[in-house]
Image (cartoon, helix red, strand yellow):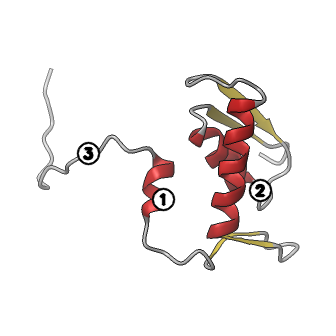
Amino acid sequence: MHIYQSTHPSVTLTDESIVEFLLAAPKPREWRASVDSLTGETKTRGQVFDEALALARGLIVRKHAKRGQVALVFGKTSVDYPVVALGCMAAGVVPSLASAAW
C-alpha cells in the first residue's frame, strides 16, 4: 500500500472542540451568524452561542445526555439549525441533521 504525503507543511491539531474553537474566535458577538433568505430572520453570533449553550445545559441537566449519544434533528431548515447543531455538540451529543427539503 502506498502512503501519500502532502507537499504542504504539517499542521498542528488541537484537542479543542469545534464549539470551543468557534467561541474563541475573535469576532464580534453582533455579527450575523445565521440568515434565513426567505423570511429575512437573522441571529447574531452572540444569540447563536447563548442559545446553543443553553440547549447544551438542558440536554445534560434535564435529559441526562451523555457524550457520544446521537440526536436526530428533523425539521425545516431555519436560523435555528446552527443553534441546535452547536448545542448538541457542546453537550457532547452527535447531531444527525435531517430535513424534509433534502
Instruction: Give the camera-side residue of 75 and 2.
Output: 75
| The C terminus sits in image quarter | top right
Q: Quadrant of residue 2?
A: top left
How much space separates mark 2 and mark 1, taking CA atoms? 17 Å
First along the sequence among labels 2 and 1: 1
> What residue do we see at 73% from left, 44% from top?
55
Mark 1 or mark 3, earlier in chain? 3
Callouts 2 and 1 close, C-beta under 8 Å = no
Question: What amino acid is at disc 2?
Answer: Asp
Residue 64 x %, y % = 71, 23
Taking the spot 80% from the left edge, 54% from the top edge, the residue there is 77
Mark 2–mark 3 Cα distance, whole angstroms, equals: 29 Å
Crowding around mark 3 (Cα neighbors within 10 Å: few <14, some 14 to 19, many 20+) is few
Q: Residue at x 83, y 48 (%)?
A: 101
Label 3, on which residue? 13
Upstream in the sequence, badge 2 or badge 3?
A: 3
Q: Whole-percent x and y of residue 97? A: 70, 39
Identify residue type, mark 1. Leu
Question: According to the image, label 2 marks what residue?
Answer: 80
Crowding at mark 1 (Cα within 10 Å: few <14, some 14-19, many 20+): some
Circle 1 is placed at which residue position?
Answer: 22
Per the model, the C-alpha gap separating discs 1 and 3 is 15 Å
Which quarter shows the N terminus?
top left
When the figure is inspected, residue 41 is found, relative to residue 53, above or below; the finding is below
Left or right of residue 44, residue 27 in this image: left
Helix, strand or loop at label 2? It is: loop
CB of mark 1 within 8 Å of CB of mark 3?
A: no
